[in-house]
Image (spheres, rainbow, N blue to C red):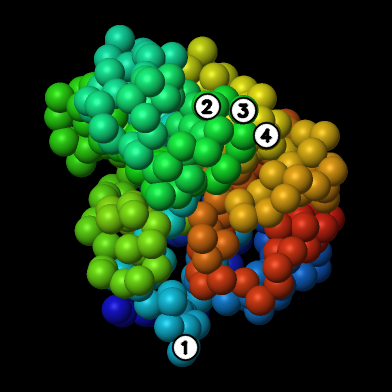
Amino acid sequence: MRVHPSRRTIVAGAAGAAAAGALAAPFSALARPTASPAMEAVLDYVRGQKTTGFLIIRDRKTVVEKNWPAPAGDAQFRFFAYETTPEGALLEDVASQQKSFVSVMAAVAVDKGLLDVARPVSDYIGAGWSKAGPDQEKKIRVIDVMTMSSGLTEGFAYAAPPGTVFLYNTPVYAITKKVLAAAAKQPLETITHDWLTGPAGMTNTAWRKRPQTPAFAAADNPTGLVTSPRDTAKLGQIVLDGGLAADGKRIASEAGMRAMFARSATNPAYGRFWWLNGSPFTIRPLARRVDGPLIPAAPADLVAALGALDRKLYVVPSQKLIVVRMGAATPDTDFDQQLWLRLMKAVA
C-alpha cells in the first residue's frame, strides 16, 4: 500500500485553476481565495477523525479537496486500502457504500426490462438460495432484499414475513449482485462498467476480490468496490442530475432514480440501498429504532451512501451539494452529526 503526503486544500486563483484541470468534468474549481474559518474548522475536524480523503462539490464546483496519509497502526483499515490515484487520493474499498452503486445498476436493469423488483428472487437465481422453506422463499421479492426487509437472518434463515421487519443484512444484500448478473446474463464486472462506471467516467472504480479475513468472511460479501473520492462524487452528481452522466447521456431514468429514494415501509430512513434523512424515526444498522431523522443537523432532503469505517457520500439536492469522506473508522461515534453541525456553518 502506497500513500502520498498530505495534499493542500483546493482553492481558486492560479492554484485552483490548475486543480480544476486535474479534476475531470463535471467538476471545476470554485472562485474563492481562501478557505473560510468555518471551513477550516470542518477540515480540522475531519482530519482529526482518521480521514484520508475529503471532497466537497457544490453546484459542480470543487469547494474543498483534501487527501491525508493513511492512519498509522490501524489494523482494520489496511484491508480496505489500495494504491493511490495520480492526484494522490487513496483508492479504498468503500464497504457498504457499494450497495448504493448497485442500487443505480438495479434501476438501469429495470429500465432495460431485465429486472422486475416485484418478482421473487428465486425467479432470477433459482430456488434454494436461502434457508427458508420453499413456500417462504418464493415470497421474498427483489424489492424486499433492496429495502433490507427480506425477513431473513444474516444466516439466511427465515425470521419474519418479507416486508414486515427492517434488518440491515449485508450477506442477503450480496444476493442482489447475483440477481443482476443473472438478469443481464453477463458478469457483474461487465454490467458495472457498461451501465455505470464507463458512462459516468469513473475510471478508478472496479470490483476486487477481498482478502480472506474473518471480518470479510462474516459479511459473506467477497467482492469489494474499490474507488476514489472523485469517482464517488460522480455518483453523487448522477443523483443530483436525475440519472444523467456528465456528458448528458442518460444512465438511469428519472423514475428509476426517484424509486431509489422512496422511503421503505419498515424504515423511513432507508430506500433502495440508500439512507434518507428527514424521517420521523430511524433504524440504523445493529441499532434499535430511535425517534428523529438520520442526521438531525443535516438538511432534511439529504440522501447518503454509507459504509463501514465511516465511508460517506452525502448528497443534498436543495443545495446542489456533494460531500465525500473516506478513511479509517472515526473516533467519534456521532461523526455524522458532528460533521454536519460544522458543515452547515461552512456552506451557509
The quadrant of the image that shows the N terminus is: bottom left
In what element is the residue under mark 4?
loop
Q: Nearer the viewer, mark 1 or mark 2?
A: 2
Q: Are marks 4 and 1 in contact (CB under 8 Å)?
A: no
Could you tell whether 193 is left or right of 247 in the image?
A: left
* Residue 222: mark in rendering: none
Above-or-below relation of 54 to 102: below
Instruction: Kindly indicate the quadrant of the structure image that contains residue 22.
Output: bottom left
Instruction: Quickly name the residue at label 1.
Output: 72
**Between marks 4 and 3, how big is the CA–CA gap?**
10 Å
Instruction: Quickly name the residue at label 2.
Output: 162
Instruction: Quickly name the residue at label 3.
Output: 164
Instruction: Kindly indicate the quadrant of the structure image that contains residue 275.
Output: top right
Above-or-below relation of 322 to 4: above
Kind of residue sitting beneath label 2: Pro
| Residue at x 47% of width, y 83% of height | 74
Q: Are marks 2 and 3 in contact (CB under 8 Å)?
A: yes
Q: Could you tell which of marks 4 and 2 lies nearer the N-terminus?
A: 2
**Between marks 1 and 2, how big is the CA–CA gap?**
43 Å
Above-or-below relation of 245 to 293: above
In what element is the residue under mark 2?
loop
Q: Could you tell which of marks 1 and 3 lies nearer the N-terminus?
A: 1
Kind of residue sitting beneath label 1: Ala
- Please say whether residue 110 is visible from this viewpoint: no
Q: Nearer the viewer, residue 30 or 191?
A: 191
| Residue at x 68% of width, y 54% of height | 287
In what element is the residue under mark 1?
loop
Q: Could you tell which of marks 4 and 1 lies nearer the N-terminus?
A: 1
* Residue 267: mark in rendering: 4
- Please say whether residue 70 is visible from this viewpoint: yes
